[in-house]
Amino acid sequence: MKGNCIVAQSGGPTAVINASACGVIQEAMRQEQIEGVYAAYNGILGVLNEEILDMRKENPVDIEGLKVSPSSALGSCRYKVKKQEDFNKILDVFKKYRIHYFFYIGGNDSMDTADRVNKMAEKEGYELKVVGVPKTIDNDLACTDHCPGYGSVIKYLATMTMEAGRDTEALYTSDTVNVIEAMGRNAGWIAAGTALAKRDEPDAPHIILVPEVPFDREKFKARVDYFLSKIGRAVIVVSEGTKNPDGSYIAEQKGDFARDSFGHTQLGGAANFIKEIVEREIRVKARFAIPSTIQRNGIHFASLTDSKEAYMAGQKAVQLAAQGVSGKMVTLERVSDEPYTCETGLADLAEVAVGEKYLPEEWVTEDGFFLKYEFFTYARPLIQGEVKPLIENGLPRFIRFKKHFIRL
Amino acid sequence: MKGNCIVAQSGGPTAVINASACGVIQEAMRQEQIEGVYAAYNGILGVLNEEILDMRKENPVDIEGLKVSPSSALGSCRYKVKKQEDFNKILDVFKKYRIHYFFYIGGNDSMDTADRVNKMAEKEGYELKVVGVPKTIDNDLACTDHCPGYGSVIKYLATMTMEAGRDTEALYTSDTVNVIEAMGRNAGWIAAGTALAKRDEPDAPHIILVPEVPFDREKFKARVDYFLSKIGRAVIVVSEGTKNPDGSYIAEQKGDFARDSFGHTQLGGAANFIKEIVEREIRVKARFAIPSTIQRNGIHFASLTDSKEAYMAGQKAVQLAAQGVSGKMVTLERVSDEPYTCETGLADLAEVAVGEKYLPEEWVTEDGFFLKYEFFTYARPLIQGEVKPLIENGLPRFIRFKKHFIRL
């Protein structure tokens, strides 16, 4: 049916979430039955606060520029829709703005929201097509081979690990151990991705700690000692979500802001915790690095494969909705590893909402400190090619929308 | 005179210190009077321990690959030569290996060592030409317009700041403040360099804290408040060496490893300190990032201008030594800003050894939190162009020497 569409970006940004938005917006502009192409400013908050942008008024050059701009150009939020009045408000706003297509780019919390909105519309007989577009650097969404955003974060973090690894290699007589903290609250996918940096025996990283493997302090120290005696140094990548055998995080942050607005514990001290063990108990000097949000926005060295898939997922969501599909998320389905080919598929929003995908145990080496061949086969295709950002005066140039708010 | 030469890399690595080594090695191979082209493994330690590499036995492709490999491929160290017996040993090793040319790539501590070795050789009548090649991301060496390594670290850190800045811009309703810790123990050059990331009013960084400006807690909080009320967020870049009005560092690290082997205080807590102030006293959520050694090894987005100058400085050192120059460091002399041109000059090693160059006070804005036009004019030419690393399977490929140790 004819009507307007709205796109929103949710949760933690990625280097390529804008490529998905670009896919949605450009495809929506091509679809005859889609009239207004709208965007919610700051994710679902933009719907709740009626801060809705008219994307047809933006410069098409800026829309194309989404492909080379990191983070969420439409704004994002960590607001978890739970209250019934919020859901009512969302549907009211959709009716008011004649929105009949809703594209939500996000993780499982977002797919849960999308699912509920879809079901409510159905129940009320309001014609609405809701299609989700996967996004998360964490790569932990169910029902999809991998998630847009993941290839880029591991390409960049693996590069950081290679480069900082060479620093430790040069300075091992002084800075003997280096600890790099990777994002990943529940799953070790990101930390695992740095394994790609290791091609030869002396290459970093030497030890990878993931949430899926309970942290064994003594075994860890023995492994560090092994590398110290063998090559005189060690580079350790630790997931922020690495856990003790009792299930507690190795480094929970304390204080008033220890939880984010979804109620998740905010982490940050894993690298420091590991550094302290190395210095106090192994008695060698260690450094640590916390790339934090830098790692997930590295468009200047993002994966072209990832960017193209992110775009494809957004574009496909619009095509499917135009064909009448609703209540689904676009998935990425790997057809073959070599040559790598990938197509899109579909999953129920409800199924994605409740799922979570961990690093398979059988891909981790027996000692728990590295990744096996199977992981390399899985991850390597995802980091191929480089996005080429626009460079102006030696630095990337990112787009920023004019933000034409719709006043009804 | 005919004889062998030796090159060594010292102190903290940079993205382009290998380009300088490449300049030295390739030029040395072109000079008729230079026979053996040697390298000290791990800086001056390689001389003291007689771990000397024969660079003529390395693959020329690997030597050329130095231009696209970060950190110190010859190894580095933080060993400060102080004892007379060390100096005696250095000269003995030089005599034993018929080394008549010594090229030391490093900062002011290294220039001090080079100066003393040069003077000792002169006193003893041993013919030795000693020429220093400047290297430091800190950009605080005296007598030179800027230092190889600086352009690359600020290009990369400014890019990180832009990219993470967009994350905060997208998520300001949740992660309102972001603090990025820049290296720079005594001088604010590196943190200042992130100012280049700011082209438009909403761009990060919003506040830059440098060691040259004593940290004024109340003024700082007022400045954060200003940005919170104006744009709803703030990205703060803080030098690790930022100091309190009493001269103490805002965040000194405690414990057994609080000093490096030069006796300098090891820092690391500046970002966390600023984050805590923001959360406890301004009551908004803050994140922080510590790029640590990652920032100084970013060959994948290094400045081509910087890389070429690093090469030129190394090459020039050899040409000058071959012409009989000794006791000098090659300097970079800016001829003009626009179009930017730069030539080499010479400075006395002794003068470089005792000097230190701070960010000029008059380049900092009156409020102490940003940089003026003059800084942009100075820094912008240094970040132009991008080094293109070799990419293999989606990640950079760095060289590693075979290491042919000379056994006499």
Image (tube, coloured by chain):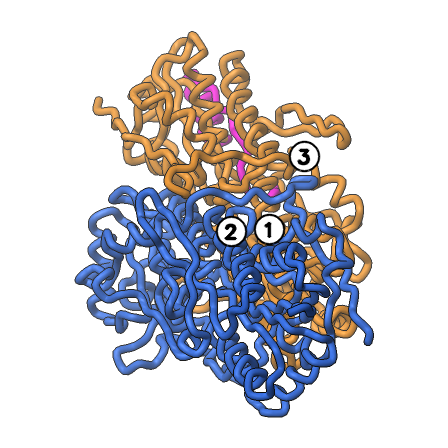
Chain colours: A blue, B orange
Distance Cα–Cα, label 1 vs label 3: 38 Å
Q: Chain of mark 1?
A: A
Q: Can residue B172 be seen here?
A: yes
- Which quarter of the picture shows residue A58? bottom right
Left or right: B332 as drawn, with respect to A333: right
Q: Earlier in the sequence, mark 1 or mark 2?
A: 1
Answer few, some or many: residues within 10 Å of disc 1's Cα (few below 14, many 20 plus, some between 14 and 19): many
Amino acid found under the numbered disc labelled 1 = Lys
- Badge 2 sits on which subunit? A
Is B113 on the left-hand or right-hand side of B163?
Answer: left
How far across and how far down the image is residue A149, in percent? 48, 58
The span picked out in magenta is: B115-140
Residue A180 rendering spot, x and y as whole percentages: 41, 59
In the image, what residue occupies the spot 26% across and 57% down? Answer: A371
Closer mark to the observer between disc 3 and disc 2: 2
Which image quadrant: the C terminus of chain A?
bottom right
The answer to if A239 sits in the magenta stretch is no
**Height in image: A321 above or below A205?**
below
Which class describes the residues within 10 Å of circle 2: few (<14), some (14-19), or many (20+)?
many
Residue ID for mark 1: A67
| Image coords of residue B250 (percent x, y) | 59, 67
Q: Residue A307, labelled with which disc?
A: 2
Q: Which mark is residue B145?
A: 3
Q: Nearer the viewer, mark 1 or mark 3?
A: 1
Q: Pinpoint residue A393: horizontal percent, then vertical percent.
A: 69, 40
